[in-house]
Image (cartoon, rainbow, N blue to C red):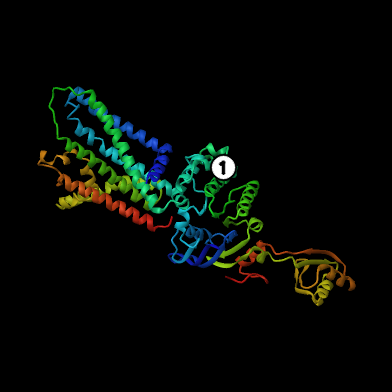
Amino acid sequence: MSVLEVRGLTKRYGEKVAVEELSFTIQQGQIFGFLGPNGSGKTTTIGMIFGVIRPTSGSIFLFGGSSREALARGRLSGTLEQPNVYPYLTGWENLQIAAAIKGLDKKLIEPALAAVGMIEAGGREARTYSLGMRQRLALAAAMLGDPEFLVLDEPTNGLDPEGMREIRELLAHLAGSGRTIFISTHLLDEVEKICTHVAILRGGRLQCTGAVTEFTGPKVAFRLRAENMCQLLDAVMQYEFAGNVRRVDDTVRLELTGEGPAALSRYLACRGIYLSELCGDRQTLEDAFLALTSREVPAGMPEEA
Amino acid sequence: MRRALWLEWFKLRKRLATWGVYITFLTLTIFLFGVSFYGARHRGPYWGFPNAWGDILTEGAPIASIFGAVLVALTVSSEFEWRTSRQSIIDGLSKEKWLLGKLLLIPLICVALYGTQVALGATLGCLDTHSPHELFFYPMSTYMTAGFGVLLGMYWYSAVALLISISVRSAGPAIGLTVIYQVFDNIVARTLRGFRLDDVAAWLPFQVHNSLLEFKQYWPHSSPTLDYHWMTWGLLLTGVLWAAAFVVAAGWIYLRRDL
């Protein structure tokens, strides 16, 4: 079942195009990472999903209906840009307002504060909070009422490594309970750790979308080093199971098809080439992101959406 | 509707700045009525019931109206600065309900401020009700209409503050523009009167507001030389129409702009 369906979404501010012809779908249970450099249109897109920014054209369907319906029924919740809280109210009172808007019981506030580790700080005014604490408070407000679909814009922004880990675990826990999560962030290793699917945005246009494994790729690429690198390169070029062979820094990089690294090592030893190093060279999401956002599409990347 | 009102009241009463504005307003009102009361006791004319009602109902009304508008501007524009207006929509409040909350907040503020003023004036009036001096006693309906007219005038000015706050979305400029607006309106009115366009000038929004806060407008037959040309019901209707125009404009802008 599709939770979110975005079709041909475009937002223009005068001459400037913030988002152009964006289309993607999120299925139930997915943890969807939304990536892109600064100014790529991520926040504008999320604003349109929440219905607080009016699209110039295109349509958004949430659970088959409008975002307004999804918000009113408590099926959708989340955060947009920096945490938006009343600075003169305590954390508890801020959640009291969120609970009142959602028509929820005040009893739910304490568990929500506990889930983000804010029980002790909940009685303090939000103006005294650090950015990380505000992030946690905003996350607690978003989780009130257990929405089916959480949309989070930079939820780990301002958090220290420990805080990031806690939020990552919390999100993983939420995703494990079947909830669908849409998360926009710059932290690619975070996305790689917790997301199942990803979309990469650049200049307001969708560069590609797919499962995270499609971007990171299987472990079939290797880097080799030997005493005589020229001899190594020649031998590898002639190896029938090697493909995409190239020099990368002071190593030879290749992809194996059909045979494993043991066979390759044997093949080279038979030719008097003894490897000083052989290691797996897996493409990370960061590699894919940098390649896509700098217009270099490496081999094996998913097609543009 | 009840939830929207509760939310606004909760946010209003918890804010220190609200109490700062209220205490300043209270101090000025005490000073204003104190001077009238003290002056009446020592120099006359008599300032007790029943003839103090006119002063109680309208003497401090301009202060109440300005402070009400300032409080609305402060409350509404801050929601844009903190982006809590946007977050409320994300939390599930519709834009219409958010706006409804603000429209309910305005009478709440008006009644609270005007009620304080009337209660304070009435308390002082009670202290001196046995003077042998002249008595001006109007029909009860005149006092009721005057009270309603002042509240309408206050609502009118707060509606202007709402429109400005929703348009500029920043507390400082919103409060500044709300206060400066009356100067602008007065200058335009004076210019029009200079061209002998008194009837046109009297229809200007802030001139209507000023008329609504004047007690003599609610007893037109008492003074054939009124500065304005309003009959009571015409004035009230014009006040309602101007207030409605500002509220509609505020809603139109809010519902169409991105948050």
**Pointer 1 residue:** A111
Identify the residue at horizontal 14%, vertical 31% (top origin). Answer: B137
Percent across and percent down for residue A252 are: 78, 69
Disc 1: host chain: A
Percent across and percent down for residue B224 are: 9, 41
Identify the residue at horizontal 15%, vertical 46% (top origin). Answer: B230
Q: What's the residue type where badge 1 is placed? A: Pro
B35 and A284: which one is in front? A284
A200 and A94: which one is in front? A94
Residue B74 as seen in the image, left or right of residue B137:
right
Looking at the image, residue A269 lies above or below residue B174: below
- Badge 1 crowding class, 10 Å Cα cut-off, few under 14, some 14 to 19, many 20 or more, is some
SS class of the residue under badge 1? helix
B42 and B104: which one is in front? B104
- Classify the position of the C terminus of chain B by image quarter: bottom left
Identify the residue at horizontal 20%, vertical 32% (top origin). Answer: B53
The answer to whether one can see residue B82 in this image is no
**Which quadrant holds residue B211?**
top left
**Which quadrant holds residue B17?**
top left
**Can you name the residue that lies furthest to the front here?**
A1
Percent across and percent down for residue A183 are: 57, 56
Looking at the image, residue B175 lies above or below residue A43: above
The answer to whether one can see residue A61 in this image is yes
